[in-house]
Image (cartoon, rainbow, N blue to C red):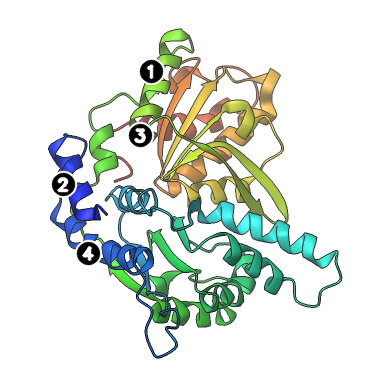
Amino acid sequence: MTDLRTLYDQNVADGRLTPDPAQEAVLPEFDRIRTALMNPEKKGFFKRAPEPPKGLYLWGGVGRGKSMLMDMFAANMGDVPARRVHFHAFMQEIHSAMHEARKTGVDDAIAPVAAQVAASVKVLAFDEMQISDITDAMIVGRLFQALFAAGVVVVTTSNRVPDDLYKDGLNREIFLPFIELIKEKMTVWELTSPRDYRQDRLAGSQSYFTPVNSESRAAMEAVWNDLTGGIGEELTLRVKGRDVIIPQFRNGVARADFHALCGRPLGAADYLALADASRVLLLDDIPALGRSNFNEAKRFVTLIDALYEAKVRLICSAAASPEMLYLEGEGTFEFERTASRLREMQAEGWGS
């Protein structure tokens, strides 16, 4: 069995990783979990199965390598059933499964759903744990209590210390026991690397491609491949009882075309949820804006405001430069602020 430290060193030797003391320091925590699950030692006269190891809550700034380390861990678990999934996507699955369970007339829909999850995996590896929806906040404590009781080990990344989860959320007092459960069942570890590797990869690179043509599309594809390895999956965000579909998502990097985000009846709450889930957005094929697509233009303004306030890095392809995107029709004056923000968001180090 190759431990995570050896795998990490191999990646460094091959030039795929840059050695980082903060990343190296947490590797024993991953190996602690991995060893306990891959080589369980039964104890006692009746050789009972051992207690599952404590999980890991790995938090810190964006771009520090949290998801990379977790992916390395989840991909090298041998025969141990492990699943790597974005936390938003997992909670969406839970809500859907609970809806189906209620159709059977059960009094408690969480119990059968948790049992179903526990029967399929031994390790849940979550990317980007964060709680922004009150419906998630209301069920997550009981759900994870059941998963832990069934022996499921949770490894998760987050940009926030546990005490800041669902901070200032509605009825937050119902959520506080979940924070204590995290501390009880998981080792809380801050990844304190001073380097933002995501920003390093983007440093000095173009982030606004115009016009929209084969060259700009190829450039966008190259950025996506560099940030994600070309791997993405659909992400469903649950916003006020509605589903908002992000076509491509991986490790905090989202990708969608203009129509997917601005050609549909989305609003500020939807864009805020996207900004909360993402640290980088690749937005393809922004058209010229004006009278013919006034509603889409208004949504685009709202989207840029949400990304700007949340400091999400925007990489996009557009029909024209920011100042030339909206030249006629009602709203041209108001768009000047959006153009200014688009220009500012291209600046070196913006969003870091």
Q: Is residue 129 at least partly visible in the picture?
A: no
Rendered view: 251 above or below 132? above
Q: Secondary structure at mark 1?
A: helix
- Give x and y (percent) for residue 279: 41, 45
Q: Residue under circle 3?
A: 227
Tell me the number on the disc at residue 28: 4
Please tell me which residue is depicted at 27% across the width and 26% down the height of the picture: 205
Which residue reaches farthest front? 45
Q: Residue under circle 2?
A: 9
Q: Spatial distance from mark 1 to mark 4, Cα to Cα? A: 39 Å
> Cβ–Cβ below 8 Å for labels 1 and 3?
no
How busy is the neighbourhood of tag 4: few (under 14 within 10 Å), some, or many (20 plus)?
Answer: few
Quadrant location of the N terminus in the rendered image: bottom left
Quadrant assignment, res 347: top left
Question: What amino acid type is highlighted by mark number 2?
Answer: Asp
Question: What amino acid type is highlighted by mark number 3?
Answer: Leu
- Give x and y (percent) for residue 314: 42, 34
